[in-house]
Image (cartoon, rainbow, N blue to C red):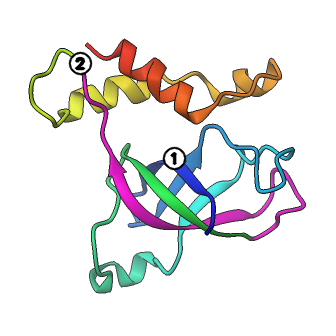
């Protein structure tokens, strides 16, 4: 089984969808791949209408299965190709229903630490602890 990654996607005006990993050590455990872009395996903007299944919207977080790293030996080059598994939602403990609204997701995503600041300090953030931190910050 391939590695599972938590990815935040952004959508371009041309229909392109790219993602970013905020914390990852790579398959061998010592090469951080947070600078690499994440692309959905098999998705092409010009064939968007032919895509079967749900696609990420701008700012959404998804749990993705890694298919391959196009340049595994290089930290900042190449891309990571993924298969979408499930959309992640941020649920506030104060909410009684099971779904978080879009403003909660935006607030949680905006409260993420700057990736360059994390790397500059030499810190490594565990994705699970990152989501626990975001859950605590949710209104």
Residue 2, position in %: x, y?
Answer: 63, 66
Q: Inspect the magenta stretch and tell me whether residue 85 lies in it.
A: yes
| Mark 2–mark 1 distance (CA, rounded to whole Å) | 21 Å
Residue tagged 2 = 93
Image-based side of 90 in relation to 122, left or right: left
Tag on residue 6? 1
Tag on residue 94? none
Residue 82, position in %: x, y?
Answer: 55, 67
Q: Which quadrant of the figure contains the C terminus?
A: top left
Image-based side of 116 in relation to 49, left or right: right
Position of residue 76 relative to residue 50, above or below, is: above
- Tell me which residue sits at (71%, 23%) in the image: 118
- Tell me which residue sits at (82%, 47%) in the image: 29
Q: Is disc 2 placed on a helix, strand or loop?
A: loop
N-term mark: 2 or 1: 1
- Tell me which residue sits at (83%, 63%) in the image: 72
Q: Residues within 10 Å of mark 2 (few under 14, many from 20)?
A: few
């Amino acid at each position: 089984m391939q590695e599972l990654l938590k990815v935040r996607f952004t959508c371009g005006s041309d229909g392109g969808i790219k993602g970013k990993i905020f914390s990852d050590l790579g398959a061998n455990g010592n090469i951080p791949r947070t600078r690499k872009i994440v692309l959905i395996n098999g998705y092409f903007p010009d064939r968007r209408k032919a895509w079967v299944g749900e696609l990420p919207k701008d700012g959404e977080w998804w749990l993705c299965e890694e298919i391959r790293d196009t340049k595994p030996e290089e930290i900042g080059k190449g891309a990571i190709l993924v298969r979408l598994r499930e959309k992640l939602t941020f649920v506030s403990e104060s909410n009684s229903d099971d779904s978080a609204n879009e403003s909660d997701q935006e607030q949680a995503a905006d409260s993420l630490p700057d990736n360059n600041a994390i790397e500059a300090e030499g810190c490594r953030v565990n994705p699970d602890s990152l989501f626990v931190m975001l859950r605590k910050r949710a209104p």
